[in-house]
Image (cartoon, grey):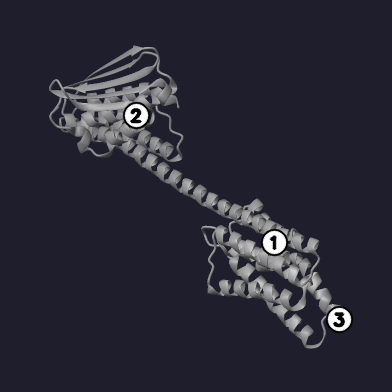
C-alpha cells in the first residue's frame, strides 16, 4: 500500500498536467493489494468452507471492484485539480465501506485489513474534513470488530493506526497534487497577462512611432508639393527626406515588434527639430545639467517624440521651446509652444499622452499638460531611481 503512493507522487514530481494512463494506475494500485493476503489466505487454507467460502470469494471480489472503480474514477481530475465526483463514485465508495465492515464481522479478524483500503478512497473522493471523520469512524469500527472477534489486541491497534495515518498521508498527497495543478493554472494566467501586456506595449510603441513619422511624412509631402508647383529645386531634397523618413520608420517598426528598439534623446531632439521646422515652427532646444543615464535618456526621448507630434498635429504654433534638465536625481522635460492653448490637444489625440503617462508613472514619474501663457505646455519629471527600477 505504501509503495502504491508512488503513482500519485510521481504525477506531482514530473509535473504532468493530465492523469496517468489507466493501466499504469491499476499497476500501482495492485501493489497495495498486499493487505488482501490475510483474507485470501483464509479462503485458500480451507479455513472457510462451503457456502461460507463462496460468499467470502464473492464479497471480496465485489469489494476489490468497488475499491478500484472508486479510486480510478476519482482520479480523473478536473482542471482545478479537485476532480469530478459523480453518483457512481459515491455508490462504489458506499459499497466498499459496507463490505469493509460486514466481511470482517462475518468472517473474522483476518479481514480487518479491508478498512485500510477505504481510507484511500475516502482521502481521494471526499473533502478533507469528511474524510477525516470517516477515517475516525472506520478506525473505531476496526477496534470494535477486533474486540468483538477476539482478534489480537496489538494487531488491532496497529490496523487502527494504519487507517488513521494513511488517511492523513493520502489527504496530504491529494492536497499537494491540487496545489500543483493550481500553481500551473496561475503560471498560465501570468503568462497570458504578460502576453497581453506585451501586445499593449507593442501597440503603444507602434502608435508613437507611426504617429510621429507619418505626421512628418505628411508635412514634408505637402511642402514638396508646394515647392514642385512653384518649380523650386528644393522639392527634390524634400522628396528624398520623405523617402528617408519612411525607410527609417520601417526599420523602427520592425525593431519595435521584435522588442529590441532603443531610443536616444539626442536622436529624438534632432528628429523633433527637423519635423517642427518642416511644419514652419521655430524651435529652440536647451539642455541643462549633467548627462542623462541611459534609462532616463530613452524615456525622455519617448516624451520628446510624443510631445512634438502633438504640437505639429494640434497646436498650430509659430514657436516651440524644448528644455531638458537633469540634476543628478530627477530628469525633467518641458515642451512649451505658443499655439492654441485653449484646446486640450493632449486628450483629443487619444492614446499618445495617455501612453506616455503610463510609461512615466510606471517609472515613478509624473506628467502634466495644460495651457500656459497663451500656448500649451507638457512637463515630464522622472526620478533617476524610479526609471532604473
Where is residue 56 shown, x and y percent of the image?
75, 81
Side (left or right) of 168 relative to 342: right
Taking the spot 37% from the left edge, 35% from the top edge, the residue there is: 247
Query: Can the viewer see residue 151 in this picture?
Result: yes
**Mark 3: few, some, or many residues within 10 Å (few <14, many ≥20)?**
few
Where is residue 21 shown, x and y percent of the image?
65, 65
Pointers 3 and 2 in contact (CB under 8 A)?
Answer: no
Q: Which residue is mark 1?
A: 163
Gap in Å between the C-alphas at discs 1 and 3? 28 Å
Q: Which residue is mark 3?
A: 46
The numbered disc on residue 293 is: none
Q: Which residue is mark 2?
A: 302
Taking the spot 34% from the left edge, 30% from the top edge, the residue there is: 361
> Mark 2 or mark 1: which comes first in sequence?
1
Depth check, front residue: 181 or 279: 181
- For mark 1, give the secondary structure: helix
Q: Residue furthest top?
A: 289
Query: In the displayed structure, would residue 368 be above or below residue 55?
Result: above
Side (left or right) of 108 relative to 279: right
Amino acid at each position: 500500500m505504501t509503495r502504491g503512493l508512488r503513482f500519485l507522487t510521481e504525477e506531482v514530481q514530473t509535473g504532468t498536467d493530465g492523469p496517468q494512463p489507466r493501466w499504469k494506475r491499476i499497476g500501482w494500485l495492485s501493489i497495495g493489494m498486499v493487505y488482501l493476503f490475510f483474507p485470501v489466505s483464509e479462503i485458500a487454507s480451507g479455513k472457510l468452507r462451503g457456502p461460507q467460502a463462496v460468499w467470502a470469494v464473492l464479497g471480496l471480489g465485489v469489494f476489490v471492484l468497488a475499491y478500484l472503480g472508486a479510486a480510478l474514477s476519482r482520479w480523473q481530475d478536473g482542471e482545478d485539480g479537485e476532480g469530478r465526483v459523480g453518483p457512481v463514485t459515491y455508490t462504489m465508495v458506499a459499497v466498499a465501506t459496507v463490505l469493509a465492515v460486514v466481511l470482517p464481522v462475518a468472517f473474522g479478524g483476518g479481514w480487518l485489513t479491508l478498512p485500510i483500503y477505504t481510507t484511500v478512497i475516502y482521502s481521494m473522493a471526499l473533502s478533507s474534513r469528511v474524510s477525516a471523520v470517516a477515517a475516525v469512524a472506520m478506525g473505531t469500527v476496526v477496534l470494535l470488530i477486533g474486540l468483538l472477534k477476539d482478534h489480537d489486541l496489538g494487531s488491532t491497534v496497529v490496523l487502527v493506526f494504519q487507517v488513521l495515518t494513511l488517511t492523513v498521508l493520502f489527504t496530504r498527497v491529494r492536497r499537494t497534487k491540487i496545489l500543483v495543478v493550481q500553481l500551473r493554472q496561475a503560471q498560465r494566467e501570468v503568462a497570458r497577462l504578460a502576453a497581453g501586456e506585451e501586445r499593449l506595449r507593442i501597440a503603444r510603441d507602434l502608435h508613437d512611432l507611426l504617429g510621429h513619422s507619418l505626421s512628418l511624412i505628411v508635412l514634408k509631402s505637402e511642402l514638396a508639393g508646394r515647392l514642385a508647383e512653384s518649380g523650386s529645386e528644393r522639392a527634390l531634397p524634400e522628396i528624398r527626406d520623405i523617402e528617408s523618413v519612411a525607410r527609417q520608420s520601417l526599420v523602427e517598426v520592425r525593431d519595435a515588434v521584435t522588442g529590441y528598439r532603443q531610443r536616444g534623446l539626442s536622436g529624438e531632439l534632432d528628429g523633433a527639430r527637423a519635423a517642427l521646422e518642416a511644419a514652419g515652427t521655430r524651435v529652440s532646444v536647451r539642455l541643462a545639467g549633467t548627462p542623462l543615464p541611459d534609462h532616463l535618456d530613452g524615456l525622455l526621448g519617448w516624451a520628446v517624440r510624443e510631445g512634438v507630434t502633438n504640437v505639429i498635429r494640434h497646436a498650430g504654433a509659430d514657436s516651440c521651446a524644448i528644455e531638458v534638465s537633469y540634476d543628478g536625481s530627477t530628469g525633467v522635460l518641458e515642451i512649451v509652444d505658443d499655439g492654441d492653448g485653449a484646446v486640450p490637444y493632449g486628450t483629443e489625440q487619444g492614446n499618445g499622452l495617455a501612453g506616455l503617462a503610463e510609461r512615466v508613472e510606471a517609472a515613478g514619474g509624473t506628467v502634466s499638460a495644460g495651457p500656459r501663457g497663451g500656448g500649451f505646455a507638457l512637463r515630464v519629471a522622472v526620478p533617476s531611481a524610479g526609471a532604473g527600477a
